[in-house]
Amino acid sequence: MKRGMENKNKGEKGGKTKNPASRVIRHRGDFSWRGVRPARYKLAGKGEHWASASRHLLVAGGKGERTKFHLRYFELAPGGFTSFETHAHEHVVIVANGTGEVRLGKKRYEVGPMDAIYIAPGQPHQLLNPGDAPFGFFCIVDAERDRPVVLTEGKPSRGKSRGGRPSASCELR
Amino acid sequence: MKRGMENKNKGEKGGKTKNPASRVIRHRGDFSWRGVRPARYKLAGKGEHWASASRHLLVAGGKGERTKFHLRYFELAPGGFTSFETHAHEHVVIVANGTGEVRLGKKRYEVGPMDAIYIAPGQPHQLLNPGDAPFGFFCIVDAERDRPVVLTEGKPSRGKSRGGRPSASCELR
């Protein structure tokens, strides 16, 4: 039994390869993965740069994968939220870390670990972390997808109104 | 805040609909989900019917979803294993419950919660549960995909050799 072969990818060239290699993408135990560098993502807050949202591209074509979908992990720090947005492509979310909220149109639902969410085409939606601990989730999308339209109606104020807590806005595209 | 709206799907008709509805797919806390009936899956063992492998279709087009991928959760009971197989389509696996093994060609790797696995096109592969507790994982695949070829070379004997433990073989297709 081995716990090696972390993110090997023979023949990778310029981010694309004809022969992507199988790989085990090791979880470090803290919702980060070996060989996957998290990106801080579309940080907002009136020009401030809060370390409140991160995106981890687990399988997204960068190593030559040809899947018609991308697998990403997002994490929102307390007070963080994604853009309230709509688009034609669908989202499938699996909550993995902590609890948070999903807004689907005018309704909000509390979600926790291993809850899944299907977000339909054209559904205005948003993910929010009103809690005190990180809220992390996998988000699976089609590899080819349209750009989101950010909605301003009902823009949440909580991210900026919680006593100086950091806030983050990110598109889930 | 609501914890309702479980698997609602307005206008569903014959498993397909023009307007799929967003939905929260609630985890019951035991790696089953409300509204998702697990199927026992490709059970083997010389004609015996062991309750050792189950498949949960979380998002797989059955409610009108148009994603170019399907999200399933598989669970292997102790001693269970999937077919040793190959196919042109890729697998992306996220381990969610317990620990197990993935075989990639001639090598085996121990995997645990939140490890991810990318299985490349044409890669002979197998998932196995040599342990004493359930081994469960999400498996994401392209919605359009080829049929697996089951490989007999090196077929594992452990499933049948562990003192009468149930064994299960299933394709991950």
Image (cartoon, coloured by chain):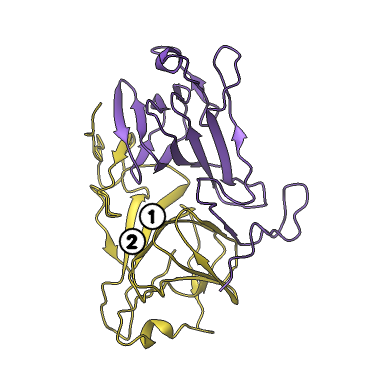
Chain colours: A yellow, B purple
Q: Position of residue B89 (x, y in %)?
A: 47, 34
Pointer 2 indicates a residue of which chain?
Answer: A
Q: Earlier in the sequence, mark 2 or mark 1?
A: 2
Name which residue lies at 61% across and 13% down.
B47
Q: Are marks 2 and 1 in contact (CB under 8 Å)?
A: yes
Residue in the foreground of this view, choosing between B72 and A83: B72
Image: B86 above or below B154:
below
Q: Position of residue A136 (x, y in %)?
A: 38, 61
Dividing the picture into quarters, in which one does residue B129 lie? top left
Q: Which residue is mark 2?
A: A55
Pointer 1 indicates a residue of which chain?
Answer: A
- Mark 1: secondary structure: strand
Image: B95 above or below A85:
above
Amino acid at pointer 1: Arg
Q: Is residue B97 visible?
A: yes
Q: Report, in whole angstroms, how far the alpha carbon at label 2 lies from the one at label 1.
A: 7 Å
Q: Residues within 10 Å of mark 1 (few under 14, many from 20)?
A: some
Image label count: 2
Amino acid at pointer 2: Arg
Q: Position of residue A46 (x, y in %)?
A: 32, 86
- Mark 2: secondary structure: strand
Q: Position of residue A125 (x, y in %)?
A: 53, 70
Name which residue lies at 57% across and 41% down.
B56
Name which residue lies at 69% across and 60% down.
B19
Q: Horizontally, is A60 left or right of A91 in the view? A: left
Quarter of the picture holding the N terminus of chain A: top left
Image: B151 above or below B121:
above
Quarter of the picture holding the C terminus of chain A: bottom left
